[in-house]
């Protein structure tokens, strides 16, 4: 593996964003083969010994990028003290994986898991503006005023105004209506709160896209590894029309 900047190596090893790793370097907490690193220092992560606070960082494992369809009733958060099933339990792969695109327990759909800390930060941080797309079932047919409220931003109870959302009616089923919603932010339970405050009771939420990555035909509880072209599309934040994805796999039961 060729030499690369140390902050990039640390980000990929799970030490946060490049910016936070630059701060580690400036603080003198990073060493390469026993020598204090400086901004601009390069290393070979397979050949050189890199330490943070005198602790050797693990050799970089093969990059892992996994799409999973989180079912209802499964947690996105991962904790050693959590007895309930989490999305990490669905993926029988070793090592630490960052969870990109957390969903509340009642929601379902696409979540990305990866050991690439740099990509995880890029997809999570609001400044990059990655879109997330949802199918949202509401219990009443919205009027234009309600849809316009979503499009212009809804003031939540804490005073925060949500960023403008793209929203349209997808289909009508009796009294219930499926909406197609695109957000560029992800505050906790945001769609449910937007619905409650505008008189649109949210019955179901299914995420179908993160950036250029599509849920495709993954069934609840199934997962698959991303193709190289899908990973590249995520990293450059370009729209991507997926071909038929690889055959999904089911997590342990």
Image (spheres, rainbow, N blue to C red):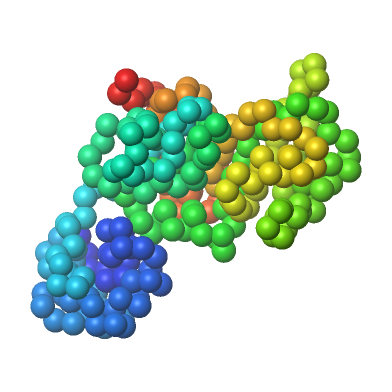
Q: Position of residue 218 (x, y in %)?
A: 47, 25
Quadrant including the C terminus: top left
Q: What residue appears at the point 76 percent right and 18 percent down from the top-left corner?
A: 173
Q: Is residue 242 left or right of residue 61?
A: right
Q: Is residue 155 left or right of residue 234?
A: right
Asked whether the viewer can see residue 228, the reply is no
Q: Is residue 35 above or below residue 115?
A: below
Q: Position of residue 238 (x, y in %)?
A: 55, 51
Q: What residue appears at the point 84 percent right and 46 percent down from the top-left corner?
A: 148
Q: What residue appears at the point 57 percent right and 63 percent down from the top-left corner?
A: 127
Q: Position of residue 90 (x, y in %)?
A: 35, 30
Asked whether the viewer can see residue 141, the reply is yes
Quadrant including the N terminus: bottom left
Q: For this rendering, which residue is in front, 72 or 248?
A: 72
Q: Is residue 61 above or below residue 89?
A: below
Q: What residue appears at the point 39 percent right and 65 percent down from the top-left corner?
A: 17
Q: For this rendering, which residue is in front, 179 or 211?
A: 179
Q: Position of residue 207 (x, y in %)?
A: 57, 36
Task: Give the image quarter of residue 174.
Answer: top right
Task: Give the image quarter of residue 205.
Answer: top right
Q: Is residue 70 above or below residue 41?
A: above
Q: Is residue 126 left or right of residue 230?
A: right
Q: For this rendering, which residue is in front, 2 or 62?
A: 62
């Amino acid at each position: 593996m060729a030499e690369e900047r140390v902050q990039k190596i640390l980000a990929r090893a799970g030490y946060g964003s490049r910016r936070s790793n630059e701060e580690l370097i400036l603080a003198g907490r990073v060493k390469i083969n026993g020598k204090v690193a400086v901004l601009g220092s390069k290393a070979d992560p397979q050949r050189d010994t890199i330490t943070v606070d005198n602790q050797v960082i693990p050799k970089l494992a093969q990059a892992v990028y996994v799409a999973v369809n989180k079912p209802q009733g499964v947690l996105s958060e991962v904790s050693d003290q959590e007895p309930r099933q989490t999305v990490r339990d669905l993926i029988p792969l070793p090592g630490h994986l960052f969870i990109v695109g957390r969903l509340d327990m009642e929601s379902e759909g696409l979540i990305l898991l990866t050991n690439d800390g740099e990509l995880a930060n890029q997809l999570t941080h609001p400044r990059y503006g990655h879109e997330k797309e949802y199918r949202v079932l509401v219990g009443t047919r919205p009027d234009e005023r309600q849809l316009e409220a979503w499009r212009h931003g809804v003031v939540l109870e804490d005073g925060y105004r949500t960023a403008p959302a793209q929203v349209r009616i997808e289909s009508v089923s009796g009294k219930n209506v499926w909406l197609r919603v695109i957000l560029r932010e992800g505050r906790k339970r945001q769609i449910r709160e937007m619905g409650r405050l505008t008189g649109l009771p949210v019955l179901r939420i299914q995420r179908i896209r993160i950036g250029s990555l599509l849920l495709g035909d993954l069934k609840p509880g199934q997962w698959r590894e991303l193709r190289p072209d899908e990973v590249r599309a995520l990293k450059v934040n370009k729209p991507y029309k997926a071909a038929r994805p690889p055959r999904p796999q089911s997590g342990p039961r």
